[in-house]
Amino acid sequence: MASSVTRRSFLQVPVAAAVAGAPAIVSAQTRGDSLRVAFIGTGNRGTADLQGILKVPGAQVVAVCDLIPERAQNAASLVAAAGGSARVFTDFRKMLDEMKEIDTVVVATPDWTHKDIDIAVLEMGKHLYAEKPLAVTPEDCRAVLREVKRTGKIFQVGFQLRHDPATNAAMKFIAGGGIGRILMCHGIRHSGEGLPRDIPWYHDRTKSGDMLTDQGIHILDLFRGVIGGHPLRAYGVGGINLFKNEPPGRTSMDGYSVIYEYANGVYINFSHHYYDPPRFTGTWEKVFGSDGSVDLVKGSWQPREKRETIQLDIPDAKQDSTYMAMAHFVDCVKNGKQPVNNIDSAIESTLQALMGTKAIYEKRVVSWEEVA
């Protein structure tokens, strides 16, 4: 969304709607048994989600909504190019009021708006694919949890890396005992780019939850999924070491390291910063066990006492993780199944991120009970 967007303006802007595109009989976009899908938020992430679901058989995008009319129109053009037709809105409440036929909604708005919009969609009786994080405070996470439980709607959170073919194959290998007892997870997400400077909410920790909750949460969700359960405690260090006041008013960190301790001595060591030289470090997602170690990114493993790297069999190896996440969501809605990233999983992953951020800010060990 644009830098001028506020929670109040997003929820209350009064706007007119328009129709974009003409009906067409092409691909899954016009099948009579398709789920009727609406989008709220069609910026960078929302557009990626839209491009993913447009390829999924059994899904028909019928409406798109964004505060910025050009973004909504662009989204409608993508739908038209895929053979469908979507009405265009800039007020999501108007969209839901006028289009009772909508079955399910994808929400990809700024982080601090998630709680209010997610609850509003659920209150309207719609199934929901909600982008991560669940919310930016523990209290708001619990509010969404209560509404999901109350409505009983299918609810999936956008941790799409769980659905990356290589990562998915690696996690199944670990779950099947492939590396024995899990000992620790080591993650690195180092880049030299950071988030766009022209979108200030990314750099306002009250709106993004800071970089751990907005970005690092993806890798931490994978590790939590591998280990199972939630961490007992967290401690870490971080801050704004390089990009002070870039952009002006910045309050989010540009780097941190955090350690999570789980039961039985299992732990996560995770480092994340935005001042890496080109091609110097990159991203690591590695799990170490008593019998070997797995690279989640590559979908490969190595026995603990051998130098041989073994490539795992990776079904759907050429598929994009966002497409796979959307296909999983559509399948769950149509067949009444619980998603991998359901509300119970998502709240633990989000609280884990908030727990680590709290530990970094307060420079102390933070226990699970303080956020749960």
Image (spheres, rainbow, N blue to C red):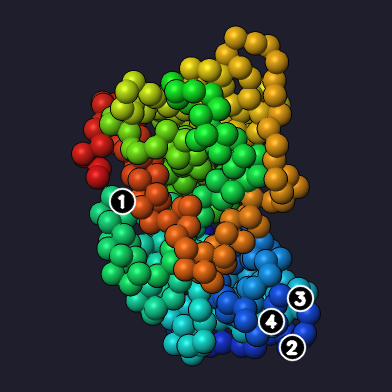
Q: Secondary structure at mark 1?
A: loop
Q: Residue type at mark 3? A: Ser
Residue lying at 48% horizontally and 57% vertically, measured from the top left: 339
Q: CA distance from mark 1 to mark 3?
A: 41 Å
- Asked whether residue 21 appears in the rendered view, the answer is yes
Q: Nearer the viewer, mark 4 or mark 2?
A: 4
Q: CA distance from mark 4 to mark 1?
A: 40 Å
Return the residue at label 1. 137
User: In terms of sequence position, does the residue under pointer 1 or pointer 2 come before the other?
Assistant: 2
Q: Nearer the viewer, mark 4 or mark 1?
A: 4
Q: Residue type at mark 1? A: Thr
Q: Give the quarter of the figure containing the C terminus.
A: top left
Q: Secondary structure at mark 3?
A: helix
Residues under numbered marks 2 and 3 in contact, where contact means CB atoms less than 8 Å apart? no
- Left/right placement of residue 307 relative to residue 11 reads right
- Asked whether residue 120 appears in the rendered view, the answer is no
Return the residue at label 3. 27
Residue lying at 77% horizontally and 85% vertically, measured from the top left: 25
Going by the picture, which residue comes out furthest to the top? 305
Return the residue at label 2. 22
Q: CA distance from mark 2 to mark 3?
A: 15 Å
Q: Nearer the viewer, mark 2 or mark 3?
A: 3
Residues under numbered marks 1 and 3 in contact, where contact means CB atoms less than 8 Å apart? no
The quarter of the displayed image where residue 23 is located: bottom right
Q: Secondary structure at mark 2?
A: loop
Return the residue at label 4. 31
Q: Nearer the viewer, residue 289 or 103?
A: 289
- Residue 203 lies, in percent from the top left, at 47, 46
Residue lying at 40% horizontally and 51% vertically, measured from the top left: 346
